[in-house]
Amino acid sequence: MQSFSHIVVYVFFPLVKVSMRFIFLFLNEVLFPLFPPPLSPSLFSCISIDREKEEEIEIEEGIDSDSVVYFASCRFDENAFGNTLEDVIGLECKRIALSMGYKKDVDVELYVTTPSRFPMKPPAQDAISVDITDMETTIPMLHKHGIVIAKNAIPLVQITRCLEEANEHISVADENLLAKGVKIGKEDFRFKEMSSRENHRFDLLVPKERFVGINTLAKEGAWVPLMKSMLGDDVTCDVSLVYSRPGAREQTWHADGPHLGKTADWTGEGEDKPFAVCVFMPLITLNKTVGFTQFWPGSHKYDELIGFGAVCPLLECELDAIVDVGNAVVYDYRLIHRGMPNMSSGTERPLIQFLYHVPQYVENRNYGKESLFG
């Protein structure tokens, strides 16, 4: 019998402050007894509560002052329980509310159902900012969240050279696109070496025999020992320029690579090791005007979440990778993400994507067969 992860909003009491003791009461008396073993260990993707503290918490900004909202992801089978999740939780909430002298209605609202656990409560960017050479810290973090920020990973002199090479390569690509009659920024296209990503966003492969600065980083960057540790000494690297020009719109949520093996179970463990890891190296400092990439931490564990990206910002599960030049974003190739719009008046947003993968994997989903430069 198939079970589903239900993303729900629990509405408790019309109070400006809520006692942590009540939250504990709700968890212990309602949810955990409701889902007996073996379901209870995998009940929540994240519980953002410190069980050692029983202090009062403020209602989050934007929440109706007459209600308290709590998000959770739980495993629930309506056929097994014979009722809807709203009904089951609602009745239990009402019973507890009455026992505490509260007589008004208690509502439960279901947001979405998914066929897998739903990763929630993303880490703060500071919490995943690491020394990329510290593998003891970085590898477990990548396993858990699917993303880390490599602090101060690239010297400025190397970034300057890479930016010069990127601009040269992009300029030549533009010339060849125009020669082939492509209306740059107004139509989608796919070539062997380059493809568009929704008009003003482009992905341009960097040849290994040229652009010494970029290819030297691919072989000698501070993150290379990490890539070898995770993917093997025979790891392969494909390099591309991913750049968004003014007018580039918000992308749809997607994962760059497929799941090739096992995905995580309801405990959040058991997925196969990554077969590919990306390093995003911005060539300019990112901000909300020129844009950035938004990630869904933890989504690399579940292929069933493809197509559910729109729920991520709704439940505030997203991580905005707004990083300074010199830092890099390292993420599992299966992680769900989207590029954000470039709202500047004239600033291109270029970054280098180093795709490290096991030799058996061949990337052929994102490009075409006709050569742009041939």
Image (cartoon, rainbow, N blue to C red):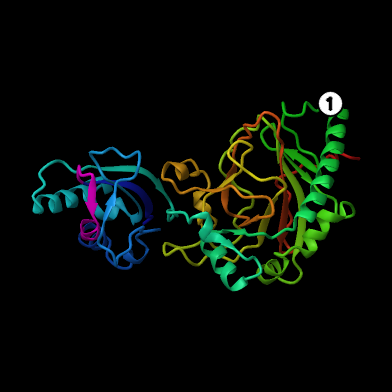
- Left or right of 148, for residue 112: left
Residue 23: image location, x then y, percent? 24, 56
Residue 339: image location, x then y, percent? 61, 41
Residue closer to the observer: 184 or 92 = 184
For the N terminus, which image quadrant?
A: bottom left
Residue drawn where x is 51% and y is 60% of the image: 127
Residue 243: image location, x then y, percent? 72, 40
For the C terminus, which image quadrant?
A: top right
Residue drawn where x is 26% and y is 59% of the image: 55
The kind of residue on which mark 1 rests is Gly
Which span is picked out in magenta? Answer: 13-25
Residue 327, image quadrant:
bottom right
Residue 138: image location, x then y, percent? 59, 67
Residue drawn where x is 24% and y is 57% of the image: 20
- Left or right of 293, for residue 5: left
Residue 326, image quadrant:
bottom right
- Left or right of 284, for residue 252: left
